[in-house]
Amino acid sequence: MKASRFALSRRTIIRASTILLLVPILVFLRSSANDAAPGRLGTLNERARAAGQGRGWRGLGLGPGGGGGTGAGKERREGRGGETWVDLREDMPWTTYEGGLPGYTVFSNLYLSRGALLAVTPSASPATSSDDDDDALAGEGAARRAPIPPARAVMSGEKRAGGGWPAPGEDRWREVEGGDVTRDELGDVAVRLPGVTYIFNDVPGPEGYLVYFKHFGIEIFLGATRALASALAGRDTTLEVAPAPQRVWFPRCGSRPGWRDGAGLNAWFLAHALPEATVEDVNGWEDREGADVPYVLETVVIVDRWSAHSVGGEVGKWGKMNANIPTLPAPPLFWERIRTNVIRSLGVHGPSHVGRHGLPVVVFIDQDRITPKLSKTARDSLVDALKEFTDRAEVHVTNLASMERNQQVEITSRAHVLIGTHSDLLLNALWMQAAPGVTLVEIFQDGAFARDHELLASSLGLKYVALHPDKVLDEASWRALGRKENKEPEIELDAGVVVGVLAEVLEGIPWP
């Protein structure tokens, strides 16, 4: 390769440490006549619109927070925060199972009373039915009212002394049939909590996995949001983006041990993704229990790790509670409200040096501290190979680990292709948009595979490519391989494999 080929007159090699990001990052570009045509690229949202995948956030009224729900009942709206007093004598909001999977269940009008969640359904028994039961069974909603799932599929109880997680007792979950029976137990008035509530029912500390962001972010929160979007889209075909929850509850977690991770990522994520939401732990749950006030949760998603694992199958094979989440149909941009909230709250939603050249953005995560890592020879060979794409893409070679979080989000949220070895740095794919062709490329040691980031990509609707050092690992191959480890610290990657994949990916990105 001639040195003049990368002279500044034809290509620009930018070290962002001296310009904008102040961290180790290389950007490779080749000048062309198109560089003088600002606006040729457009935003990723525009790409999604152009491909018929829905509108971007600007057209959806997406700001921080934002709720949504079902609405029901004759109500008297009073007080702050939109709480609603529901007169159960005049109207009984029935609980409806809206959809989901074991461990990821979505309900509307689920009740909370004295520390127990109650699914209230009309009684079909002539001995116990009342007028409102008969009306519900004959009404328009009767046909779509799915059976309430078994308790074990919704949430787990306390761990047995010998191990294992049984179904919850009636002090935590039960079904109540009939309006009169419900009024006898709850009284005549309940408080409606509008919008969406996430209930994460896992136990605190390492045993519940909440204290690891890679489990909390991908398995718990992303899984809950896709389940919510799938359930709501099933009854509203115009839904494009999942509503953000207005409250997040951890009913089994205290302050120590709790749901927070040591690096503070869980709390950081909730603060930026849900800037208007309230977060409650076991203390808030017990406060509500002690107040003896019944609540109606307008829309609720209950996530429980051990309920998800109770079904076996793909979950058992991969050891991942969210293994079936990608099978839930959801609008392509269902995650966009969460993604946008994070981007906007960090102040990186406006003009950026990333993507300013009107070309697809390719980001290679360059790191030498986390294993597995590329050998120095393989790394240098890959960087040289990536330079060959600077007439077709804006290529960034960047050490994400050395960046501030806002810088990580800024660059990855604009990426069309993210390439890296198997590590938690690939969690930054959470900020990529599910536009056509957007791809996550993961590099493994020879013979190794784990599905963590494939599930992240497929749950978000991104394309995913797994690589071994000398070949592409297609889905049939990684499924046949299963979970495999290789503790070799370095990968001797054939850069030609990446070149072939990247050429194909860039060809598949719709571009003017």
Image (cartoon, rainbow, N blue to C red):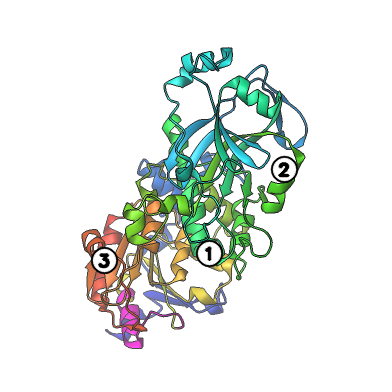
Q: Quadrant of residue 88?
A: top right
Residue at 51%, 49% in the rendered image: 156
Earlier-in-chain disc, 2 versus 1: 1
Q: Mark 3 packing: few (<14 Cα in 10 Å), some, or many (20+)? A: some
- Specify start and end residues of the magenta stretch as a single range: 369-386
Q: Is residue 441 left or right of residue 57?
A: left
**Is residue 356 part of the magenta span, yes or no?**
no
Q: Quadrant of residue 70?
A: top right
Nearer to us: label 1 or label 3: 1
Q: Mark 2 packing: few (<14 Cα in 10 Å), some, or many (20+)? A: some
Residue at 32%, 87% in the rendered image: 377
Q: Which residue is mark 3?
A: 501
CB atoms at circles 1 and 3 under 8 Å apart? Answer: no
Q: Position of residue 278 (x, y in %)?
A: 68, 48
Q: Mark 1 packing: few (<14 Cα in 10 Å), some, or many (20+)? A: few
Could you say which disc has been placed on residue 288 in the image? 2
Q: Quadrant of residue 53?
A: top left
Q: CA distance from mark 2 to mark 3?
A: 54 Å
Image mark count: 3
Along the viewing direction, whichever of 353 and 361 lies nearer the viewer: 361
Along the viewing direction, whichever of 230 and 238 lies nearer the viewer: 230
Q: Position of residue 134 (x, y in %)?
A: 52, 14
Could you say which disc has been placed on residue 207 in the image? 1
Can residue 453 be seen here? The reply is: yes
